[in-house]
Each structure stands twice: as structure tokens, then as C-alpha cells.
Image: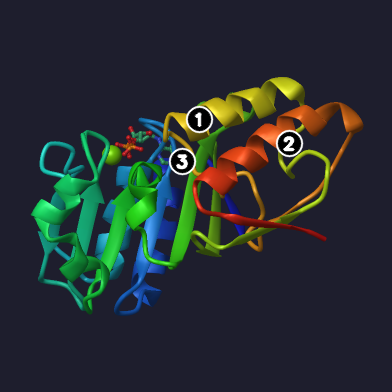
Amino acid sequence: MVIETRKPEETYELGRKMGGEAGPGQIVCLSGDLGVGKTVFTQGFAAGLGIEGPVNSPTFTILQQYEDGRLPLYHFDVYRIGDVSEMDEIGYEDCFFGDGVCLIEWPGLIEEILPEKVTWVTIEKDLEKGFDYRRISVENVMVNHRVYGHMEAPLGIHSRRKAAAFIEDIKSGKSSPLKNITSNYHYHTVSAESEEILDEIEEMLRAKGFLIEAV
Ligand code: ADP
Ligand code: MG
């Protein structure tokens, strides 16, 4: 599902709606660059859970916990995490596998410990459509699962330059390999020229434990 918003209130409202529908044990991964609206979304999400207190980005604490809503909310912002082991120190497993709802900003940085089933929300700007425009995709995905493809370029990658940037983002942990691949992990080819890039992407996905099968 893709939602386009044109002001912060609309992103807040999407969050509020999803918070209202959230169930125990749900994990929402929230990816997107700095300043794109992850915290705005989170504030709406918290309101949807009936949380009243102020909700801010827990950038300096990694985890912020809210207990006054319909379900506990565990808000992670792992932007400044040095090593995944810091998540153990926080006791993340009690949050991920408990009865509350987890919201994780910068999930790509801790992808190796994400549970298999997550809701992946990606917020992106498109300056050509205005400063306040946001494209928000919401997908239920299986992390560390099978990726099906055939020998061309992944969906969503329209040029060699974009594909190269995609590879760099995955390498640096800024982007999830799932981000530019459709929710059921199918990707398709556009040209023979992109084969070399595709090989590199496949190698990287394999290194991250994804299984790739031709379709
Ligand atoms: P992040 O947590 O992703 O770093 P924030 O939520 O803190 O980003 O900030 C997003 C900024 O973008 C806010 O200043 C907000 O007012 C502004 N903004 C403008 N348009 C939108 C929109 N459509 N959706 C969300 N935020 C928007
Ligand atoms: Mg934030």
C-alpha cells in the first residue's frame, strides 16, 4: 500500500490510524532519511494507541517506553547504535517478543536481529512534488526470507546510477535490501546491461542470508 501525504498532519493521521489498528506483538519498522517524518508518524501512532504523553525521538536513549496506552509501545531509534549487542543490553527481546507494539526507526541497522514478520513503513521525499510531499509505503514483509528474481534489475531501480546507490546504501546499512524489492520479494529484469549490478546485489543479499531463486 502506498500513501502520499502533503503535510505533516496527514502523516500523523496515517500513524494514528495504524496505531489504532495495531495488535500485540506487532513490529513496525520505520525507514527513511533524517527529517522525513518518522517521528511525526510515531507521534500519530502513539496517539492511535491512546498514549497521551509527549512522544519524541529517543535518539539519545535508543528505547523509549510508553505504558499508558491500549498496549505498551516500545519506540526504538537505533540511529546511534554502535553495535547490535547494545540491543541485548537494552533487553530488546522482551519488547520484540512481548505483548506490546514495537516501532523501530533505522531498522536497517539492526536487521540481523529483526523478527521474521514485520510491517515495513518507508517514508520518502520527492522534491519535484514539493517540499512537504511524502511517499509512504506500508508492506507486511518477511525478513530474511526468500527472494525470487530473474536476471535483470530489481523493481524500482530504473537506472544504473540508482542501482549503484542502492548497493552503497545496503552496504552501509542505511537501506534495507527489501526496500526496493516488492513485498513478496519478486524482482524483474529491465535490460541485459544491468546484469553486472544484479550479480552484485544477489551476492550481497546472499551474504545477508537471503535465499534467491529464479522464477
Ligand atoms: P525524522 O524523525 O524522520 O527524522 P521528523 O518527524 O522529526 O523526522 O521531522 C519531519 C519534519 O518534516 C517535521 O518538521 C515536519 O513538520 C516536516 N514535514 C513536512 N511535510 C511533512 C509530511 N508530509 N509528513 C511528515 N512530516 C512533514
Ligand atoms: Mg526522528
Q: Which residue is mark 2?
A: 198
Q: Is residue 128 above or below residue 44?
A: above
On screen, residue 17 versus residue 126, left or right, reads left
Q: Which SS class for mark 1?
A: helix
Residue 7's label in the rendered image is 3
The quarter in which the C terminus is drawn is: bottom right
Specify which label sits upstream in the sequence, 1 or 2: 1
Ligand 1 quadrant in view: top left
Between the C-alphas of marks 1 and 3, the distance is 27 Å
Ligand 1 neighbours mark 3 (CB distance < 8 Å): yes
Residue 128: x and y in percent read 64, 24
Bin the neighbour count of mark 2 within 10 Å (Cα to Cα): few under 14, some 14-19, many 20 and up. Answer: many
Kindly identify which residue carries mark 1. 169
Question: Does residue 53 appear to the left or right of 44 in the view shown?
Answer: left
Q: Secondary structure at mark 2?
A: helix
Assess disc 3: are there few (<14), some (14-19) or many (≥20) residues with their C-alpha within 10 Å of its C-alpha.
few
Q: Residue at the spot x=43%, y=29% of the render?
A: 172
Quadrant where the N terminus is found in the figure: bottom right
The amino acid marked with disc number 1 is Asp
Residue closest to the eye, 131 or 136? 136
- Give the alpha-carbon distance from disc 1 to disc 2, as whole Å: 15 Å
